[in-house]
Image (cartoon, coloured by chain):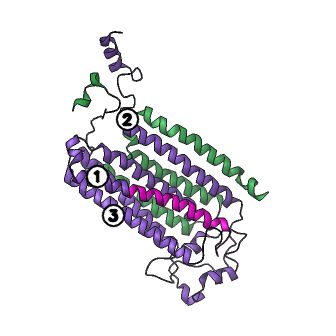
Chain colours: A green, B purple
């Protein structure tokens, strides 16, 4: 493709050539996501109800699932670190905001 | 400025111009930035949800624990919600336990099946994400036929998910939930449910529309003529994002 010639780089039309990595990783991610979802449901019924530990377990499992979706399905693992950082670092700041606002949340409305 | 100097510099340094520093196309970078901004929107909805939710005390423990698969009609008659209000499991000053609200399954009326239907919806979205990656992978091999097949399955998955959500909303509304009132607990409970799952459902709907356009273009041979299937990847990113958001909607609305 003419796009691969770096001397003729045109930002608006540049498309890097991508080779297929096969389907093995896709099936592995499917199995991991399915198992984690089943673990969620099993824990829902087996853990003591409505404690802090229980909520943290579900949030951690959600973050692990998010990691596999972003890294594998959305191909972030194979992108350049520059791009990954541009997307993930701002979002980590928002997660900090979420944690902060939730821990203060009870004060806005309860009092 | 001589042209040959800039050519030598551009092949060596990432950020000195003359090449894509992220090594992705313009469109893909913009899709990522859009998804980041959309993630901010969903975060703000979840902050609102979390703040309201944690300002209510946890639901009172049930006197008698309901085991999954138990027959509700036999135990409580046809007015499960009213019975729950009578024993104090549903009242306006406590956030209701999700397992008592979302315990229905199509064709199995009156059986206590907490979370089974939303788990099914989760699996539908995971599977349609998988067919989407398979379409992207087929696109890398320039396999027009396979891209078409997998895009078709992805659209079916999206429609199945929307159908499930329509059923769940219908169930919820039939039991008396509106934006300003519901029989399960505080008015905020149903309002936040409708707004957050509705906003997510609208994303799924838009995703199905985009997937359909990609499917038609693939079938017409547009991407084959263009020489690459990058549009499938870009719309794929959006579709996976919809799945990603559902992971958190599932966690915060149904599990916690």
Say which of B83 and B34 sits in front: B34
Q: Is residue B141 visible?
A: no
Could you classify mark 1 by the number of other residues whose Cα lies within 10 Å: few (under 14), some (14-19), or many (20 or more)?
many
Say the numbered circle drawn on residue B135: 1
Label 3 and label 2 in one chain: yes
Label 2 sits on residue: B26
Q: Between disc 3 and disc 2, whose residue precedes?
A: 2
Q: Which quadrant of the rendered structure holds the N terminus of chain B?
A: top left
Label 3 and label 1 in one chain: yes
Q: Is residue B133 magenta?
A: no
**Labels 3 & 1 near each other (Cβ < 8 A):** no
Q: Residue A93 placed where, x, y %?
A: 58, 40
Region of the chain picked out in magenta, as a range: B184-208
Chain of the residue displaying label 2: B
Secondary element at tag 1:
helix
Q: Between disc 3 and disc 1, whose residue precedes?
A: 1
Please give the name of the residue rendered at 69% of the width and 83% of the height, measured from the top-left corner: B86
**Figure quadrant of residue A19:** top left
Determine the CA span between mark 3 and mark 2: 30 Å
Extreme residue in the top direction:
B2
Determine the CA span between mark 1 and mark 2: 21 Å
Q: Is residue B251 visible?
A: yes
Say the numbered circle drawn on residue B156: 3
Please give the name of the residue rendered at 31% of the width and 13% of the height, measured from the top-left corner: B3
Say which of A5 and B127 sits in front: A5
Q: Which quadrant of the rendered structure holds the C terminus of chain B?
A: bottom right
How many numbered markers are drawn?
Answer: 3
Secondary element at tag 2:
helix
Q: Nearer the viewer, mark 3 or mark 1?
A: 3
């Amino acid at each position: 493709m003419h796009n691969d010639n770096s001397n003729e780089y045109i930002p608006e039309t540049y498309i890097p050539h991508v080779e297929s990595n096969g389907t093995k990783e896709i099936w592995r991610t499917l199995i991991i996501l399915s198992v984690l979802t089943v673990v969620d449901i099993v824990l829902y019924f087996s853990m003591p109800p409505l404690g802090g530990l229980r909520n943290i377990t579900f949030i951690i499992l959600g973050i692990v699932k998010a990691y596999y979706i972003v890294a594998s399905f959305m191909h972030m693992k194979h992108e350049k670190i520059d791009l990954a950082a541009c997307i993930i670092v701002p979002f980590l700041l928002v997660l900090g905001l979420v944690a902060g606002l939730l821990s203060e949340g009870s004060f806005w409305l309860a009092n | 400025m001589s042209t040959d100097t800039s050519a030598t510099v551009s092949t060596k340094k990432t950020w000195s111009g003359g090449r894509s520093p992220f090594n992705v196309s313009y469109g893909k970078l913009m899709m990522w930035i859009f998804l980041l901004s959309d993630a901010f929107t969903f975060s703000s909805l979840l902050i609102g949800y979390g703040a309201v939710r944690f300002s209510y005390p946890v639901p009172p423990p049930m006197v008698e624990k309901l085991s999954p698969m138990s027959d509700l009609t036999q135990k409580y008659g046809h007015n499960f919600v009213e019975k729950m209000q009578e024993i104090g499991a549903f009242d306006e000053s406590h956030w209701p336990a999700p397992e008592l609200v979302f315990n229905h399954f199509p064709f199995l009326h009156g059986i206590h099946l907490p979370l089974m239907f939303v788990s099914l919806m989760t699996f539908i979205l995971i599977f349609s994400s998988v067919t989407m990656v398979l379409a992207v992978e087929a696109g890398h091999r320039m396999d027009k036929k396979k891209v078409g097949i997998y895009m078709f399955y992805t659209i079916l998955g999206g429609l199945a998910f929307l159908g499930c959500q329509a059923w769940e909303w219908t169930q919820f509304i039939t039991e008396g939930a509106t934006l300003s009132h519901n029989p399960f607990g505080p008015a905020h409970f149903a309002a936040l449910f409708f707004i957050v799952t509705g906003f997510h459902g609208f994303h799924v709907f838009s995703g199905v529309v985009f997937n359909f356009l990609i499917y038609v273009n693939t079938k017409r041979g547009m991407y084959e003529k263009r020489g690459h299937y990058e549009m499938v990847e870009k719309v794929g990113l959006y579709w996976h994002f919809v799945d990603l958001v559902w992971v958190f909607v599932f966690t915060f609305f149904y599990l916690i």
